[in-house]
Image (cartoon, grey):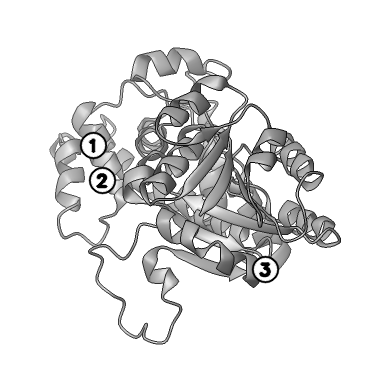
Amino acid sequence: MQIGIVGLGRMGANISRRLMRAGHSCVVFDINAAPRDALGKEGAKPVASIDEMVKALTGPRAVWVMLPAGPITEATVNQFAGLLSSGDTIIDGGNTYYKDDIRRAKSLEASGIHYVDVGTSGGVWGLDRGYCMMIGGPKVAVDYLDPVFAALAPGIGDIPRTPGRDGHDPRAEQGYIHAGPSGSGHFVKMVHNGIEYGLMQAYAEGFDILKNKLSTDLPVDERFVLNMPDIAEVWRRGSVVSSWLLDLSATALAKDPQLEKFSGFVQDSGEGRWTVEAAIEEAVPAEVLTASLFTRFRSRQDHNFAEKLLSAMRFGFGGHIEAKEPGNAAASAAAIGPGSTAKGS
């Protein structure tokens, strides 16, 4: 299947690569020539503009926009809207606010252009592990694009089947779902990221309690010198709190037990805020998710071990480089190693 990919950062480029590995044909564009030329050498067709991309695609055309949420994605979708035809599809695979998806889908209805929103989870590991996808949009467009989603998804792998799933949509076991109409994919991904905030905060606080068991505020006989890397490792083995986030924490602690390379300054990318807003609109109590978001705000004022572990996990799953202080991401990147400052969870 032929598809256009706009935005060749970490995820956009690897989405293109994974699709080409599965035999799909990718027409790629980025404002920077280097990533599109690199993919051209790997088998993609690079183009120098969105106009050229539309001309290079055969109908019904499908274009995947993988850009940061906000004005740049809005402008790109609007540009495609003026160039595509009835029956074509615009896919937004970034972290767009779901209400913007609903608005865009309505605005495209008159022209017959389909709009599909894809909440995409997988980060820097997606090329090899695959991408978990939560998809919103009209059934006709989602079904047409199924070969693309199936190629990007991780597949059932070695995860045991959930008892009682016979008769349910088999795509969920493969790592992707059609969640509902336009906006629903990004809504589900938004809540996914809100939950991620809470899980990360729970690990971070737990390890901070362990680390501070040596506090001078405690009686001498109640002070323990605890090995953080070993605790993280043993919890990975048969514990009920084992998870990929714990795997990433264990890796970070094994390399740097005091997390000295991490400042404890923790960003948020928007989905946590939107999840809290949704909870307010629905009158749903969300104490943990809200507290974890507010902790990230506080982290920009003072830093403890918990916040350093949050930084370590974000670097582990997404390559996120935290600034030592606001506006100083470059110094942190140099200290930690190669990576990207693009936003994520």
Per the model, the C-alpha gap separating discs 3 and 1 is 41 Å
Is the C-beta separation of discs 2 and 1 under 8 Å?
A: yes
Is 226 placed above or below 234 here? above
Amino acid type for the residue under numbered disc 1: Thr
Q: Name the residue under label 1.
A: 251
Q: Nearer the viewer, residue 13 or 83?
A: 83
- Horizontal side, residue 335 vs residue 93: left or right: left
Alpha carbon of mark 2 to alpha carbon of mark 1: how far? 6 Å
Left or right? Give the position of 22 relative to 88: left
Of 48 and 326, nearer the camera is 48
- Residue 299 position in % (x across, y down): 50, 31
Q: Does residue 133 appear in the picture of this structure?
A: yes
Residue 184, position as x, y percentages in the image: 63, 64
Q: In this view of the protein, which residue sits in the foreground, 213 or 174? A: 174
Residue 121 x %, y %: 46, 50
> Image quarter for residue 237?
bottom left
Task: Residue under label 3, please give it.
Answer: 138
Mark 1, Cα crowd under 10 Å, few <14 / some 14-19 / many 20+, is some
